[in-house]
Amino acid sequence: MVDCTIKVDQPRAVPKMSSAEVIGMRDVAAPLASGLEGVVVAETRLSEVDGERGRLTLAGHDVEELAGGGGVTFEDACGLLWGGALPGAAERESLRRAIAEGRTRAFALLGRLGDALQAGDGMDAIRAAVAHLSGDVPPAAIAGAVATFAAAWARRCAGEAPVAPDPALRLSADYLRMARGAAASEAEARELDTYLVTVSDHGMNASTFTARVVTSTGSDAISAVVAAIGALKGPLHGGAPGPVLDMLDAVAAKAGEGGAPAPGCAERWIQAELAAGRRIMGMGHRIYRVRDPRAAVLERAIERLERTAGGARSARLALAREVERAAEAALSARHPDRPLRANVEFYTAVLLDALGLPRALFAPTFAVGRVAGWCAHIDEQRRAGRLIRPSSRYIGGVPRAAAPPH
């Protein structure tokens, strides 16, 4: 590098540095963090992901304790994330009414959404529909609207008319009713609540970071949520639950009598997929080095649902467990230094299928839960009040020096 020091006893001009040399200095000063891995961009009270120990904390509560018992509702999670504590009975009812009003107001907009709900992909549909909301509506209105739009899209895909919300119900029960066209049992509503609470927030994930970046510019909440939906649509973020069910169906097609896994069937299918260079869906996570704690919560939710249904769904769960064991063993043998274990999407597929939701609605249902966290992060970022503006490292060509004037 050119010597830029000035010696006092021998004064001389500081030599001019080329663009390439300046870039070189920036390279040394700012090490590249590809994918922003390990970079801390905010302080938050909302959630913490401990990938080494396999622990997720939601506003001071372990997710396995908060959602694992099946008694905490989506409205409770909203109160926790938006207000910092689990709500009491009066506050829970107030939140329930506010979110129900959001569903009702969104339903009244369906006729003015143009072709938004005609989109072939549910995430495209809810992204376009949410964009019709006014810029800074309250979080409860946004949460209610996402549920209404997702359910209405599912009904139209099935060739049926959208079902109007029932403001007397909590979101989980009403969402199942609007999406399926039939009332949900208390057990079904309870386990959908388990899912929605479990996925309500998860550290600085891609869609949450997107929402915070948009918010940091001073933009409105709807713009931030629309951008977050676009990020969640990506298959590397929220788009894998449906393909997990496709995988289980493929294994089941080779299964034994009654759909039960034949000995070695799952192992052979997994090995064939890996040999063909294909990914095993629902396995592995960017952060977790052990099994995703949310997978355990949802697995227990499926067990509870089975007990209320008299074991009618046991074949699907048994198959899922067999595929998980086979996939974990095969991936461990291939990648002994890179743990790849079940993530939240693995048992999401089994649970949402057991609840009677079509697989095309799985990703939009993820958004129904995650919007609680997005709204909380939007508020938190506004309070921080600082534009998120990282740097990049230029690796293109250096402009030629201008020719001296004649």
Image (cartoon, helix red, strand yellow):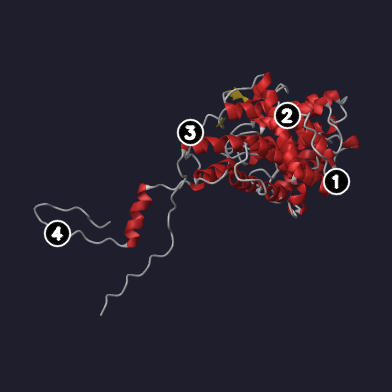
Of residues 256 and 19, the one drawn nearer to the viewer in this rendering: 19
* Distance between the alpha carbons at the discs numbered 2 and 4: 73 Å
Q: Which residue is mark 4?
A: 12
Is 200 drawn above or below residue 304 in the view shown? below
Q: Amino acid at mark 4?
A: Arg
Task: Kindly indicate whether the residue at mark 4 contacts the one at mark 1 (C-beta within 8 angstroms).
Answer: no
Nearest to the eye among marks 4 and 3: give it. 3
Nearest to the eye among marks 1 and 4: give it. 1
Which residue is pictured at 62% across the width and 40% down the height? 137
Number of marks in the rendered image = 4
Q: Secondary structure at mark 1?
A: loop
Q: Which residue is mark 3?
A: 43
Is 194 drawn above or below residue 353 in the view shown? above
Q: Which residue is mark 2?
A: 193
* Distance between the alpha carbons at the discs numbered 4 and 3: 48 Å
* Distance between the alpha carbons at the discs numbered 3 and 1: 44 Å
